[in-house]
Amino acid sequence: MRIAEQRIEGKLREMDAVVDHNQWKVIDAFQKHQVSDFHFANSTGYAYNDRGREVLDLVYADVFGAEAALVRPHFASGTHTISTALFGVLRPGDELFYITGRPYDTLHKVIGKQGDGSGSLQDFGITYREAALTSDGGIDWDAVEAGISETTKVIGIQRSRGYDWRSSFSVSQIGEMIARIKRINPELIVFVDNCYGEFTEEIEPTDVGADLMAGSLIKNPGGGIAETGGYICGKQRYVELAAYRLTAPGIGAEVGAMLGTTRGIYQGLFLAPTLVGQAVKGSIFAAAMFEQAGFVSKPAWNEHRTDLIQAISFTGPDHLIAFVQGIQRAAAVDSHVVPEPWDMPGYEHPVIMAAGTFIQGGSLELSADAPIREPYIGYMQGGLTYSHVKYGVMMTLKTMQERNLL
């Protein structure tokens, strides 16, 4: 462990600088909008004129360099938030075109199939297209330019790797994608799935031209405090359309009782830059330790980071299951539980998940998951403290040793 920490010391210091920048950015937004304790007050019923809710939207918009934001506990998950954004801006006859390959598994049923009866995008006559990434994980611009048609309305970009063995896209790369798309057709709406990416770099996709962006509050921006919810931010007119989808046309963001969640969402955002920094440091350590143990990680410990996810390639299901179960053994909550693969709703293969978390599904907390399918890649994310991630990594290696897998 000491050898690994000596190797990564420079990368850890780089992350400290990112934390400082983002922490100060969040504080500046709080101060600009004069956040006070009365903004944390509860609201009920229609919650008209809930000033805490209104200022929260303004703070998020400033932090993410956007015209507007919609931050609500009413979003059940990141998938729900993304779905709301897409349904908000797409209409029958429009096309959604993902240029970063097939999106994360839980979005497959949101996209759906025409006539499937589930209420999916395609069931409403919204067509779908995707362009596979090139062999080196880049955008296939020939396929993208050939694929954009008169009906294409929204270009989808997934920042994180999802369940793929590829590098996540940096904000700089996303900015280049947006610029090129706008040269092809400036009217196209560029949507970015920002899950796992917030505060890992000094800027966000909306800072470099994304029209619409979404993420989950039980991931990075919730700071391990927000108990539920999601955010959508971007251009004013597109955020407004998403708000109409969340509530109802003509009502939008003007109603919605916060039900005692407001303070936690504010405080979570305040803590998020520092806690994301702790998690990223943990991922750097994990990459170095697994490399020492003979496994290949992506990103490697010395590569640039743009999200929380650390992918590790294993030789078979036994290593993969031991890895996930080892992460669970390191948890402060439910360490006695032994996760097993199961047919989780929204996924196309059996999935095993380690989630000994204070917030159910909270992936800013130390957690891991993986589909049980070749090439047997485990995905670790989160860690509210660097020390906890180190403990988790050591426990996974111990679990493998106990099973004669090392």
Image (cartoon, helix red, strand yellow):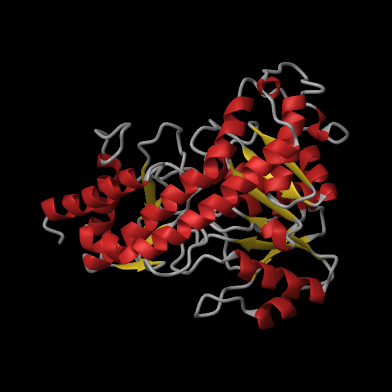
Q: Is residue 401 above or below residue 271?
A: below
Residue at 30 percent of width and 66 percent of height: 7
Q: Quadrant of the N terminus?
A: bottom left
Residue at 68 percent of width and 50 percent of height: 64
Instruction: Tell me the quarter of the picture where residue 39 sits.
Output: top right
Instruction: Tell me the quarter of the picture where residue 288 sits.
Output: bottom left
| Front residue of this view, candidates 191 and 1 | 1
* Furthest residue toward right: 250
* Furthest residue toward bottom: 142
Instruction: Tell me the quarter of the picture where residue 281 sits.
Output: bottom left
Lateral position of residue 31 relative to residue 347, left or right = right
| Front residue of this view, candidates 59 and 123 | 59
Whether residue 119 is visible, yes or no, is no
| Front residue of this view, candidates 223 and 93 | 223
Residue at 33 percent of width and 31 percent of height: 333
Q: Looking at the picture, how far across and down is residue 338, in whole percent?
A: 26, 39
Q: Is residue 253 above or below residue 60?
A: above
Q: Looking at the picture, how far across and down is residue 394, in whole percent?
A: 22, 51
